Amino acid sequence: MIEFQSVTKRYPDGTVAVDALDLAIEDGGITVLVGPSGCGKTTSLRMINRMVDPSEGTVLIDGRDVRAQSPSALRRGIGYVIQNAGLFPHRTVLDNVATVPVLTGTGKAAARKRAAELLETVGLPAAFAKRYPAQLSGGQQQRVGVARALAADPPVLLMDEPFSAVDPIVRDDLQEELLRLQSELGKTIVFVTHDIDEAIKLGDKVAVLRVGGRLAQFDTPSALLANPVDDFVASFVGRDRGYRALGFLPGHGVPVGPVSSVPVGTAVDTARGQLTDGWAVVVDDAKRPLGWVSADLLSSSGDAVSAENLISGGSLYSVDAESGGTSGSLRNALDAALSSPSGVGIAVDSGGAVVGGITADTVIAALAEARRSGEVPT
């Protein structure tokens, strides 16, 4: 466990970066520090590995004051990942990852073997080992940074806005990769971000800090969204927190109804007779969805429905074969319905074949039932 006990950081000019912080970070989970610029989240993170020392109070790791150890000894048990990865530009990817094991006395051959294993763990092909950082994309560099932080198998991993410098698609991939790694490794991760969506997605617990370094609320993401303690937290979490809270409610209560579908190549006259409310989903030979066809589109088509002349849009939603309902969250279910041009989200099985559809009305009904059953605060 990592504990902050009445920790304050005051600089010589009188600026208070962290003010009387009390926080207990449990082992084996991801704790996210989030807040606006100037709230002391990075300063708090750096006090864990003594890159910054507190002016008052105590930081403990497993009951031991971090100041009882030399900074170098302390940091050997703490991985550290920063924005833009901070890789050594003159070293190959493999040697970047092997740096810490070599410094701690591991033989070079053993360290490189471990580095190669870690590159595979973070999803980088073996061919990347001989490249230099400048030859990698931003997302690939961040993966190397995570591998390097894990190289000495530290129980604690500190991550300071590690994904903020990459584009949204790569960022989402890196977040998913971190969650996958954490499910396998079970590290104690302290993660700093200014993005509340990232905090909600990654955190087992989220600490919201105010400007001036005071803790506003420390809670689970679902509790934070449902019950912000004051106007500051409510404003920071965002006005759409109710929608985001749906991500913590299972979608198994959403029924999957019938949806009109036509195989690609179906004669236009036949397809026109199979539309429901003016729409049908077009499927391939394996019943996987290719896109939507509408009455208006059919009127301007040739003799048969073509895969090249369809309306795209709408996310897919997987079905849990055991329960017969959707297997993700209510937020995923609602997004599938709202993003579809027809207003019907497509439900698919594990093989990607269409099994039915879900609508926004059925999702809202499932939410109402969840409220009645006490699954979500009213």
Image (cartoon, rainbow, N blue to C red):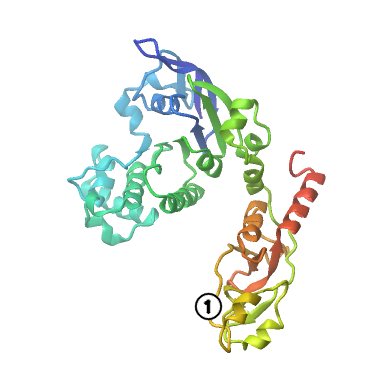
Residue 296, can we see it? yes
Q: Is residue 186 left or right of residue 217?
A: left
Q: Is residue 215 left or right of residue 152?
A: right
- For image coordinates 73% across by 59% down, the residue present is 254
Residue 152, can we see it? no
Q: Secondary structure at mark 1?
A: loop
Q: Is residue 334 left or right of residue 115?
A: right
| Residue type at the position of mark 1 | Asn
Task: Kindly indicate the quadrant of the structure image that contains residue 272.
Answer: bottom right
Q: Nearer the viewer, residue 123 or 61?
A: 123
Q: Find the residue positioned furthest to the left.
A: 90
Q: Residues within 10 Å of mark 1 (few under 14, many from 20)?
A: some
- For image coordinates 24% across by 42% down, the residue present is 102
Q: Is residue 131 left or right of residue 38?
A: left
> In the image, residue 43 lies at what x, y percent?
40, 25
> In the image, residue 329 lies at what x, y percent?
65, 53
